Image (spheres, grey):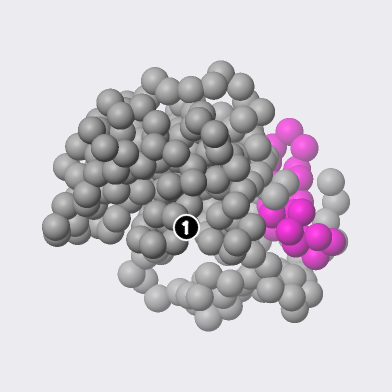
């Protein structure tokens, strides 16, 4: 098998780039994604992945962390530093929470841990893309809480008037809190209502995204921690 697989002629859900050096896993993902209606392009190393993203403009990237040479974390770092916010779903075989947190901090939208169910991965990808593409319902022109303003239709965020680059998931998490300002959400509620997850997904994922949003918004961040409960968006000055 070569390092890349051609996409089907008539994908219905867009092209997904699968970056995985294990050809058997790459082929398994290709078959499951094609069955779910996606076009698929595969590659086995980070350098080829960066070139493929630039050439093909995929709707999402499924990115193995443990690539030879340039690993998946560095690929994601380079994409984000170049201003490319294509949704990224990490796949990792490492039993190390640090790797997953670093990936999320770099702007990955989700991750799955090997061994994984292909059906679960396809479902996770669908959740990421739903957040990216939004719904057919008309979006309000603007939401504001304190010194932060977001435009859900154009998916833009501003803090004290300056534009802020947020990942797909960061934007949706912030928007969810701002639409329900002053309401306190538990981590489990946010995982269910923003990510679409339930069950045993690690709630640390929420904390990492909240920290990233706060870092990008700076002192304008309206997100408040309610100790022992969760988070809310409050127009008053933030208290930790």
Q: Residue at x 30, y 29 (%)?
A: 23
Instruction: Quickly name the residue at label 1.
Output: 86
Q: Residue furthest left?
A: 9
Quadrant of residue 75 within the rendered picture = top right
Q: Is residue 206 visible?
A: no
**Does residue 55 sit above or below 116 in this rendering?**
below
Count of marks overlaid on the render = 1
Residue 232 horizontal/vertical position (percent): 69, 52
**Does residue 21 sit above or below 110 in this rendering?**
above
Mark 1 residue element: loop
The boundaries of the magenta stretch are: 213-233
Q: Residue at x 19, y 56 (%)?
A: 11
In the image: residue 12, left or right of residue 115: left
Residue 193 horizontal/vertical position (percent): 48, 47
Q: Is residue 129 visible?
A: yes
**Does residue 126 sit above or below 174 in this rendering?**
above
**Does residue 184 sit above or below 23 in this rendering?**
below
Residue 156 horizontal/vertical position (percent): 58, 72
């Amino acid at each position: 098998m070569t390092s890349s697989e051609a996409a089907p002629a008539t994908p219905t859900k867009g092209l997904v780039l699968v970056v995985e050096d294990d050809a058997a896993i790459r082929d398994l993902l290709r078959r499951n994604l094609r069955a779910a209606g996606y076009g698929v392009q595969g590659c086995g190393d980070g350098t080829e992945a960066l070139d493929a993203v630039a050439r093909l403009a995929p709707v999402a990237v499924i990115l193995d962390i443990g690539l030879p040479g340039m690993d998946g974390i560095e690929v994601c770092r380079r994409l984000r530093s170049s201003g490319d916010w294509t949704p990224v779903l990490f796949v990792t075989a490492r039993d190390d929470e640090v790797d997953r947190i670093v990936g999320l901090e770099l702007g990955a939208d989700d991750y799955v841990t090997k061994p994984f169910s292909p059906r679960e991965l396809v479902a996770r990808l669908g959740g990421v893309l739903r957040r990216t593409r939004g719904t057919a319902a008309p979006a309000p022109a603007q939401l504001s809480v304190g010194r932060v303003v977001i435009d859900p239709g154009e998916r833009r965020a501003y803090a004290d008037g300056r534009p802020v680059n947020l990942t797909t998931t960061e934007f949706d998490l912030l928007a969810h809190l701002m639409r329900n300002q002053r309401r306190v959400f538990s981590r489990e509620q946010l995982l269910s209502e923003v990510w679409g997850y339930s069950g045993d997904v690690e709630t640390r994922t929420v904390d990492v995204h909240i920290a990233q949003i706060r870092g990008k918004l700076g002192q304008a961040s309206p997100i408040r921690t309610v100790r022992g409960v969760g988070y809310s968006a409050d127009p008053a000055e933030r208290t930790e």
